[in-house]
Image: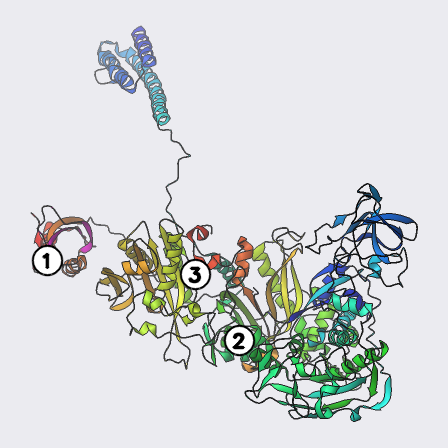
């Protein structure tokens, strides 16, 4: 009996070894382990074994069965793996073939720049507000300390509709609307379209965009203005960006300044991009003029504030190295697709 | 283009002129530029006048011989102090004894003798042979030295520059020419009228570098005649002319002005003419006060009257042009006639000539706004009007006229008649403010000491009276009116860079984006997901676009706002439809052969409430989509529906084909209707419109009027539970009369399907073979589901029966 089992096992293992396909392994399984298989036959012949030997023989049969099953299973796994691998070998593709794209559209570079700026200031607790593009002279000029005969009015080359209604030349007009609401403190930015009568060329457009910023609260200082805009510049142009404030003049702020940032091409060493200066002018700003506060019924003894104005196109042109402003309004898809 | 205000103007001045008043100034050009810019006098740039001028000395020609082999060349022996060298030249103008600039072997000059553009690195001069004769250097023309005859009028037209006899042989020729200097270009802001002068700049430089400032000491040596015997002045309009100063100089001898004066003027970009003209120009630069010189012998009655012109007057200015005047133009007149337009330009009739004997100087102050407007109306903007229009300090007029007379006398140009005729009303009082150091520090966020502030005030001539603790502003600083102005002075000279950087404290605020803008953001997102790229168009356009877009003559969109001073007809009206911008953009792409273009725009149209405008117009944000190439009407429709879905507008949209848009294909257009409100339209662009935009392709557009969309939008969402019970689908295939729209069939399905109706989808539409003329085959898949149970056959059959009954009522038959 023992020999017979050993023989069955050896033969089964040999057949497993010789199998070259899953079907053959299955045959071996049926032939040896199946209901009509050889091991089953041995078990059936147990009645011929002496009762005292039966447990021992039974154990021997089971051991043989387990061994065959184990080897069989291993072989099946191996075989399956080989089959899968062979299949995948045939499925090799040329990964350099073109992608199937969804042809998603692209945002205008102005909007990309604007959303950046909005993200930064919303994070600092500013509210985004809008004001009218066709505006009253009062909001665009007078309430910003630019009375009727002020030279700045000529310099701005304003488009007029009537004597009193014009196309706003600056988003600063939105400041006045916000201040008039009488809700303090104010932290706002006002992006929008502005108009000046400049002929179209590579650096001028009669219509462009600005983002006005305004903060009014108790104890707002020029140092706060510097700190806020320095944070803004770092967020927009990178952590290493440094800022420089130069005195300047705007009728609606005093003291006033222009802010330069270190050239983001050369980091301030000086290059062609920044005309060798290492700095790039980015915005105008200042402490809100007390007369401007007074005109909007805010007490300058109690409240101070700062304001700033950024040219959106200027940021977009600089950030994306666009060399001709006209590209922004032509809407050539080959241009837009680059953003 | 600038972010904010562009104002002020530019001024060029040689550093040597500034140093004349701030002699202790010692810094490099770059340091000067940086420091001045940081204290508020912005330096745009600078150029060295001695750029590329190396090894150039004064030499004297001792002997001239003919070149043995060349008729046009001469051989010169030139004494350069240390030795005599031989130089061959072709210049025709030199003679023995002339002192000339000589560039030595290995030296450099700035340009060629033809005066063309200067090479960046100059031209190196080497010893060599000219036609076999040694030449050990080069004698230079003024052009080779980087300048020209405008600036050096004494230089010969062709040939070598010849010095006056007083220069020292062997000395630096560049110094002798006054070219060891740097010209700085300043950008002066419009509030700093005082800085449109060399004295103003010098005062700022002195304060910036904390060096002493020595303005010119003016003392006029007068003769024993009295000015009143020569001239009287009557100012009829004191509002337009707050001050008029007149002085007289006699025995005028016209000749060249001294070299130093010529050099300074030349560096400022002013061509030297003669002593009299140069002195008036010099004082204008130095003091920022324009002056006018009349030939007194042409002044009738020896009387000056300042009055307004009469409407319709014509006056010939000294440039020979006739100018049309009106009663808002201020004129300088004599007893009989007009002799000059105040503050703008003198008249031809009183012009100074070389024969002038007696000169009447005028230094006046005029109303800046009036000068600005007059200059604009007359169409004549001069250096003088540019200064007057900023509103000059009346106190400065007297100082300047005295300075001019001093120079006349000192430079031997003439004699100064004793006294001044000075007509003015009440002079503006000086501004006095209490000294409040804490307030300045509070505004700036600084800790500047009181002493440092007082130091600063001293330098900028703001007087401090410790007894009253008050500050008095100098009259030339018309911009110092309030405490914040003083704070800026402190900040400027303390240093903007030294002010700390802090963040605002105080009540916290929440960053917010208004709902309208959030919806616009969604519109951008969806448009881009659907392949549309964002364009931007102008707000103004031509009134011709209405014809181009086939709007009827009486269409209300033609009531557009007109710009009164447009850049031209093409930019003359505020748009009332957004289509022209989109069509123009599509056409641009089409003409450039870009394929499959999809664009969108978010921009306002401007609808007037009444014309002419009495109140602000309605600015309506338009979401405009346009495309050509791949895609059709239904692609566009898909974008609209995706957008509405994304902003919570989940109810069924209806499309009304009777949109009535002339610019769209009559059979391919629809109004977009949501809950009974028309939100916009879409369609295929009318082929004639495409033709008007030179597009030979089909184009599609959609326009949503955002103010109508936004009230329906919401970001609220409610989870409805995913169905647990199975759905049952039924497909129906119908023969439908052609005029019946899918929308009508769907209305029946939706209405009659009952509560268990879940969805219906069109899956086939067909016309042609096997379908009778006038009919189409339409197939829908209809899905039913109940939320609380598995549907039974009877439920579905009953619902289907209702639907089919309804359809049959419309003349629709089921296909067998």
- Which label sits on residue A184? 2
Eye-nearest disc, 1 or 3: 3
The image quadrant of residue A72 is: top left
Q: Are both tags, 2 and 3, on one chain?
A: no
Q: Nearer the viewer, residue A228 or B339?
A: B339
Q: Nearer the viewer, residue B74 or B2?
A: B74
Q: Are both tags, 2 and 1, on one chain?
A: no
Whole-Å distance between the Cαs marked 2 and 3?
35 Å
Coloration mode: rainbow
Left or right, B696 with respect to A183, comes to left
Q: Nearer the viewer, residue B433 or B720?
A: B433
- Which label sits on residue B807? 1
x then y, percent, for residue B46: 72, 61
Chain containing mark 2: A
Chain containing mark 1: B
Furthest residue in direction right, as rendered? B82
Question: Mark 1 or 3 closer to N-term?
Answer: 3
Q: Is residue B244 visible?
A: yes
The residue under the point 53% across, 54% down is A322
Residue B771 located within the stretch drawn in magenta: yes
């Amino acid at each position: 009996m023992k020999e017979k089992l050993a023989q069955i096992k050896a033969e089964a293992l040999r057949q497993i070894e010789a199998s070259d396909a899953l079907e053959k392994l299955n045959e071996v399984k049926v032939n040896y382990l199946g209901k009509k298989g050889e091991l089953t036959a041995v078990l059936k012949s147990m009645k011929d074994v002496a009762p005292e030997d039966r447990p021992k023989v039974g154990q021997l049969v089971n051991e043989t069965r387990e061994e065959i099953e184990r080897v069989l299973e291993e072989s099946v796994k191996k075989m399956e793996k080989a089959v899968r691998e062979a299949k995948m070998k045939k499925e090799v593709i040329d990964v350099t073939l073109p992608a199937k794209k969804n042809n998603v559209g692209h945002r205008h570079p102005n909007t990309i720049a604007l959303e950046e700026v909005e993200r930064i200031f919303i994070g600092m607790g500013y509210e985004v507000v809008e004001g009218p593009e066709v505006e009253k002279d009062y909001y665009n000029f007078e309430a910003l300390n630019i009375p009727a005969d002020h030279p700045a009015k000529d310099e701005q080359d304003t488009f007029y509709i009537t004597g009193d209604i014009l196309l706003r030349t600056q988003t600063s007009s939105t400041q006045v609307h916000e201040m008039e609401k009488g809700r303090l403190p104010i932290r706002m930015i006002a992006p929008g379209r502005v108009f000046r009568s400049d002929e179209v060329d590579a650096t001028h457009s009669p219509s462009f965009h600005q983002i006005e910023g305004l903060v009014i609260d108790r104890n707002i200082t020029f140092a706060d203005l510097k700190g806020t805009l320095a944070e803004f510049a770092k967020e927009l142009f990178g952590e290493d960006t440094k800022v420089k404030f130069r005195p300047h003049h705007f009728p609606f702020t005093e003291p006033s300044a222009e802010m330069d940032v270190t050239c983001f091409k050369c980091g301030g060493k000086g290059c062609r991009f920044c005309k060798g200066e290492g700095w790039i002018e980015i915005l105008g700003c200042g402490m809100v003029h007390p007369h401007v506060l007074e005109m909007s019924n805010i007490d300058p003894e109690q409240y101070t504030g700062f304001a700033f104005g950024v040219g959106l196109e200027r940021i977009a042109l600089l950030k994306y190295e666009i060399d001709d402003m006209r590209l922004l309004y032509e809407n050539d898809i080959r241009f837009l697709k680059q953003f | 283009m600038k972010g904010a205000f562009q104002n002020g103007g530019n001024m060029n001045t040689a550093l040597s002129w500034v140093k004349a008043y701030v002699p202790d100034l010692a810094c490099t050009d770059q340091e000067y530029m940086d420091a001045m810019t940081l204290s508020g006098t912005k330096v745009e740039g600078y150029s060295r006048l001695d750029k590329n001028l190396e090894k150039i000395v004064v030499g004297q020609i001792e002997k001239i011989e003919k070149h043995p082999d060349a008729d046009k060349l001469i051989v010169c022996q030139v004494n350069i102090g240390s030795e005599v060298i031989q130089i061959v030249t072709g210049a025709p103008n030199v003679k023995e004894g002339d002192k000339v600039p000589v560039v030595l072997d290995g030296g450099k000059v700035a340009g060629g003798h033809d005066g063309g553009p200067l090479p960046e690195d100059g031209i190196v001069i080497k010893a060599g042979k000219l036609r076999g004769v040694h030449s050990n250097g080069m004698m230079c023309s003024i052009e080779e030295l980087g300048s020209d005859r405008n600036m050096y009028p004494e230089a010969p037209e062709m040939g070598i520059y010849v010095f006056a006899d007083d220069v020292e042989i062997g000395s630096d020729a560049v110094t002798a020419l006054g070219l060891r200097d740097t010209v700085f270009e300043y950008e002066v802001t419009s509030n700093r009228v005082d800085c449109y002068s060399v004295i103003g700049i010098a005062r700022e430089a002195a304060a910036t570098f904390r060096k002493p400032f020595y303005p010119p000491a003016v003392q006029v040596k007068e003769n024993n005649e009295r000015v009143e015997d020569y001239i009287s002045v009557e100012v009829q309009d004191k509002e337009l002319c707050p001050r008029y100063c007149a002085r007289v100089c006699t025995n005028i001898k016209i000749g060249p002005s001294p070299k130093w004066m010529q050099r300074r003027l030349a560096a400022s970009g002013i061509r030297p003419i003669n002593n009299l003209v140069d002195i008036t120009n010099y004082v204008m630069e130095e003091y920022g006060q324009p002056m006018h010189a009349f030939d007194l012998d042409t002044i009738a009655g020896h009387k000056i009257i300042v009055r307004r012109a009469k409407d319709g007057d014509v006056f010939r200015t000294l440039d020979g042009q006739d100018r049309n005047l009106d009663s808002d133009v201020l004129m300088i007149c004599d007893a009989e006639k007009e002799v000059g337009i105040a503050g703008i330009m003198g008249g031809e009739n009183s012009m100074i000539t070389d024969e002038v004997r007696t000169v009447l100087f005028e230094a006046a102050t005029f109303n800046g706004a009036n000068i600005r407007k007059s200059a604009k109306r007359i169409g004549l903007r001069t250096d003088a009007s540019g200064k007057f229009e900023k509103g000059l300090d009346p106190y400065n007029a007297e100082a300047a006229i005295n300075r001019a007379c001093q120079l006349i006398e000192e430079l031997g140009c003439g004699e100064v008649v004793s006294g001044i005729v000075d007509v003015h009303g009440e002079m503006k009082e000086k501004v006095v403010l209490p000294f409040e150091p804490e307030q300045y520090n509070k505004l700036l966020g600084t800790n500047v000491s009181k002493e440092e502030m007082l130091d600063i005030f001293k330098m900028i001539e703001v007087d401090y009276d410790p007894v009253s603790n008050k500050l008095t502003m100098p009259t030339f600083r018309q911009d110092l009116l309030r405490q914040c102005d003083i704070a800026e002075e402190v900040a400027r000279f303390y240093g903007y860079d030294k002010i700390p950087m802090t963040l605002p404290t105080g009540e916290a605020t929440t960053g917010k984006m208004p709902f309208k803008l959030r919806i616009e953001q969604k519109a951008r997102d969806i448009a881009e997901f659907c392949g549309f790229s964002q364009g931007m168009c102008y707000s103004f356009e031509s009134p011709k676009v209405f014809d181009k877009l086939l709007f009827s003559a009486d269409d209300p969109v033609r009531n557009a706002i007109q710009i009164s001073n447009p850049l031209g007809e093409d930019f003359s009206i505020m748009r009332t439809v957004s289509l022209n911008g989109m069509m123009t953009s599509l056409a641009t792409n089409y003409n450039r052969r870009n394929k499959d273009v999809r664009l969108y725009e978010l921009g306002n149209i401007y609808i007037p409430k009444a014309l002419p405008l009495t109140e602000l117009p309605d600015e309506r944000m338009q979401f405009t989509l346009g495309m050509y190439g791949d895609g059709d009407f239904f692609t566009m429709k898909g974008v609209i529906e995706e957008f509405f879905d994304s902003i919570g507008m989940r109810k069924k949209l209806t499309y009304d084909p009777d949109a009535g848009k002339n610019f769209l294909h009559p059979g391919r257009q629809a109004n977009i209707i949501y809950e009974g409100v028309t939100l916009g339209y879409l369609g295929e662009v009318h082929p004639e419109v495409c033709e008007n935009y030179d597009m030979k392709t089909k184009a599609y557009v959609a326009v949503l009027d955002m103010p109508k969309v936004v009230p329906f939008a919401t970001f609220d969402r409610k989870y409805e539970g995913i169905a647990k019970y199975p759905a049952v689908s039924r497909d129906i295939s119908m023969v439908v009369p052609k005029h019946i729209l899918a929308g009508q069939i769907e209305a029946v399905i939706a209405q009659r399907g009952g509560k268990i109706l879940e969805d219906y989808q069109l899956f086939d539409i067909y016309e042609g073979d096997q379908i009778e003329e006038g009919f189409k085959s339409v197939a829908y898949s209809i899905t039913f589901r109940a939320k609380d149970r598995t549907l039974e056959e009877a439920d579905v059959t009953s619902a289907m029966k209702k639907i089919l009954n309804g359809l049959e009522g419309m003349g629709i038959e089921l296909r067998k």
